[in-house]
Image (cartoon, helix red, strand yellow):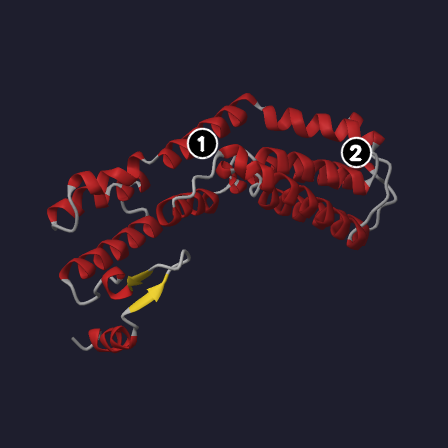
Amino acid sequence: MFFNCPFYGIFNVIPESLSSLDGKSFNIKEKVFFVNSQSAWFVLAILLLMAIWWATEAIPVAVTALIPLALFPILDITSFQESAAPFADKNIYLFLGGFILALGIESSGLHKRMALKMIITMGTNGATLVGSFMLVAALLSMFVMNTSTTLMLLPIGLAVCTVVAETIPNISDQQQRHFDTALMLGIAYAATIGGMSTIIGTAPNIVFVQFMNNQFGIDISFFDWMKIGVPVASVMLFFAWIILTNIHFLHLSHYQVIQK
């Protein structure tokens, strides 16, 4: 009861009705999930339990994700059909397709071939070498998770940094540090920016599409998202490259590096 008092006071000052985007009024109190209900506390307890198990990995992560499917019907929070419906959402299968694509790219070594081909084609100096890695990272993260893209390209980037340090005899420690920083930051930034281009690029995109569909009935298709996401990501990627190469610019001949 003590913890319910603040929520009860806040709930009492909420107006009876508000106007929606289309001008229609609705009773907001009917939309509020009472925090003093038994179901609400059950949901909070399950949320905390799942958070702890996800953080500690006491049981497999996939098993933890299925806890609501089992406990919600048992605790009479929702029916089994309502609990299972989110697991069969079309966006979940879209996300699953992205994971399968990521596994295919990683197992086939496509990301390595793309990176090496881009380096050979564009990597003639420090700025273009950083730009080539950023372009590959952005392209991959359009269909692969940002973190997965970064993990794929990070070993290649570290290898390039090592080869540059061993191959270029006149490079100073400061120049090497600037180049390493620009390359590592470029991969990370480009992976994040590229993830904005498609729905499956990153998890928040899926959540946003589902929210717009559930709350406002707006269905955003894969190509509808790309019409906005690709131009915005392209502009952001260009400016990120300009900023990185202006701050950590290093003009070097990388012909020996590419050959090696």
Seen in the picture, residue 126 relative to 100 is either above or below; the reply is below
Seen in the picture, residue 187 relative to 118 is either above or below; the reply is below
Instruction: Give amino acid for label 2.
Output: Gly
Q: Position of residue 149 (x, y in %)?
A: 56, 37
Instruction: Give amino acid for label 1.
Output: Phe
Q: Position of residue 16 (x, y in %)?
A: 27, 70
Seen in the picture, residue 28 relative to 253 is either above or below; the reply is below
Residue position for label 2: 123
Q: Quadrant of residue 82?
A: top left
Image label count: 2
Residue 36 visible here: yes
- Label 2 – label 1 distance at C-alpha: 30 Å
Residue 154 visible here: no
Q: Is residue 236 left or right of residue 195?
A: right
Q: Is residue 109 left or right of residue 17?
A: right
Residue toward you, 89 or 212: 212
- Locate the C terminus by quadrant: top right
Q: Is residue 235 left or right of residue 228?
A: right
- The residue lying at 58 percent from left, 24 percent from top is 109
Residue position for label 1: 99
> Which dot marks residue 154?
none
| Secondary structure state at the residue bearing disc 1 | helix
* Residue furthest front as drawn: 23
